[in-house]
Image (spheres, coloured by chain):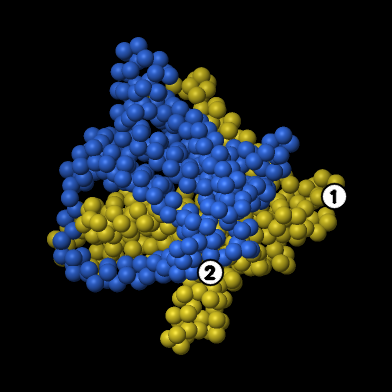
Amino acid sequence: MAAVVGDEMVQDAGPVPARRGNAGWLRRMPVWRWLILVIVGIYFIIPLVSAFRFTGTSAFPAVFRQEGFSSAFELSLKLAVITTVLTLVLMLPTTVYVHLRLPRLRRLMEGVTILPIVIPPVVLIVGVLQVAPGFLKSQPYLLALEYVVLAMPFAYRAFDAGLRALDLQTLVEASQSLGGGWGTTLWRVLLPNLRASLLSATVLTVALVLGEFTMASLDLYQTFPVWIVNFDQTSGPISVAASLLALVVTWLFLLAISTIGGRRSRRSGGAEVSMFSVGRRNTGGS
Amino acid sequence: MPVLRSARTFLGIVPFAAYIAAGLGAPAVAIAIGAFQSSANGGFTLFNIKTATRGVYLHGFETTLVVAVITAIVPGIVGFLVAYAIFTAKRGALLRRAVITASGVFAQFGGVPLAFLFIATLGTTGLATGWLTAIGFNPTAHGFNLYTATGIVVVYMYFQIPLMVLVMLPALEGLRPAWREAANNLGAGWWQYWRYVGGPVLLPSFLGCVLLLFGSAFSAYATAEALTSGSVPLTAIQIGSFLNGNVLAGQQNVGKALGFGMVVIIAVVMVFYAVLQRRSARWLR
């Protein structure tokens, strides 16, 4: 059987058959597996424990009372909202369009959208400050415009994965034969089907904006991560507490994606977001 | 479906193309031009490039490359082992889900909060420093200092290992059980399977992922800056100090030359990456 399943046929592939892992020598190595996981686990857990020990419990509520916290957090939230809206408005129609009309450009799109990962943000901001018109440079919202570029790789991959799992052509034709225009098709047919992709693109974008330090600090705006660093000069435990809070928030965000995305993919057999398409997901099975 | 190659078909991607051109293309071009422009009169010059490839800046590139290579290879191997351990665990098992979500969290976790975590762990008064001293191995006495390139390597692993797990898993999924069963049926042992089947199939993806890690470590700025306050000469930090205004008169454009140099190095890496991806795409579909 083991037919090579093309991208267009992903939705036809049923649930991947259970892996027959107990064949021979593989199963005889659980000791190795545990050893590796335990050693790596220790490396990951000790810093977290240290940070908790260092801050103590009283530092957490104190974070919210610090001077500058609310204005920095507010700026980060504003940037997150603007970036997310712009990213979704720009990337969703573009990705749908490429899938429908220009499928041959998909390779090129993948290449173009990996560029923001490739060009170091510290280099990008140098160029941006060079070319940005004056009225934009005096505003923090220039950052939002650039964050859209940084978020593009994640948004594109999220939508691409979601669209690959849909029978896009049929959905669009069905909608249009029932009299739906492009707006209706996008809003009432595709959007509800792409909820998981939409969510993961949103969450990744928000996580990116809330954590971005390089461009914000070099553009001299006090976003939340920049505030944490500037704040360090005065009180150690509180900035470590703020860092731990930032970690927990990111973790909750990502847990939300994996829960909702996981539930969806069990239903439709797709919409799994892989950040980097190093080798396609195996959808063939044997 | 035949592709209509008329100009009108391409109208739909104009907003995207325009945004990329303005937000990414224009800044990149500005850096490339600025790298060859005299800071004084705007004329063509090779002065910036020459300055950027000498002395403290050359040392910066060297340090950055060493850090990036080490934090690509070591986490690459460790991450591969973790990914493989997870891959052989049962599908949907708690262990597997826990490691995958944790990888998602930690791969995103970088910059300032990460630096603080490690200051609390391996800084002079850190918890692990205390433990190690208690068992008679004071890290500082043995030449370890968190605020140096060595420290940066230790800290970068914290997001590089999970990143490797995330990018390696899809490639491992492409390793068909049928191949292993076939090898088993033909009497191949563990070594033979990896030498003749698994290894050659996975090698291109593995190298591709390692190159990705290299790029990630190469362009990291926030973590190193927060950890060392710029005392370790990494190229990214040097560029940052140009923006912060710590610059000699007549050298403003050297920062752009440094940026240009970084992009060139990354471009070379990406060409390798594309070649490797093409090779692995042959098997992993």
Q: Quadrant of residue A173?
A: top left
Residue at the location (75% across, 55% down)?
B245
Whichever of labels 2 and 1 marks the residue nearer the N terminus, that label is 1
Residue at the location (44% across, 21% down)?
B4
Q: Nearer the viewer, mark 2 or mark 1?
A: 2
> What residue would you read off at disc 1?
B40
Q: Considering the image in quadrants, where does the C terminus of chain B appear?
A: top left
In percent of width and height, residue A145 lies at 59, 37
* Front residue of this view, candidates A204 and A152: A204
Q: Amino acid at mark 2?
A: Ile
Q: Which chain does the numbered disc 1 sit on?
A: B
Q: Amino acid at mark 1?
A: Ala
Q: Quadrant of residue B146?
A: bottom right
Question: Which residue is farthest bottom?
Answer: B136
User: Chain drawn blue, letter?
Assistant: A
Residue at the location (27% across, 68% down)?
A33
Q: What whole-number distance in Å separates the C-alpha atoms at marks 2 and 1?
A: 42 Å
Q: Is residue A145 left or right of residue A126?
A: left
**As displayed, is residue B226 above or below residue B41?**
below
Q: Is residue A110 left or right of residue A258?
A: right
Q: What is chain B's hue in the picture?
A: yellow
Helix, strand or loop at mark 1 = loop
* Front residue of this view, candidates A193 and A277: A193
In percent of width and height, residue B83 lies at 33, 60
> What residue would you read off at disc 2?
B119
Q: Considering the image in quadrants, where does the N terminus of chain B appear?
A: top left
Residue at the location (61% across, 35% down)?
B21
Helix, strand or loop at mark 2 = helix
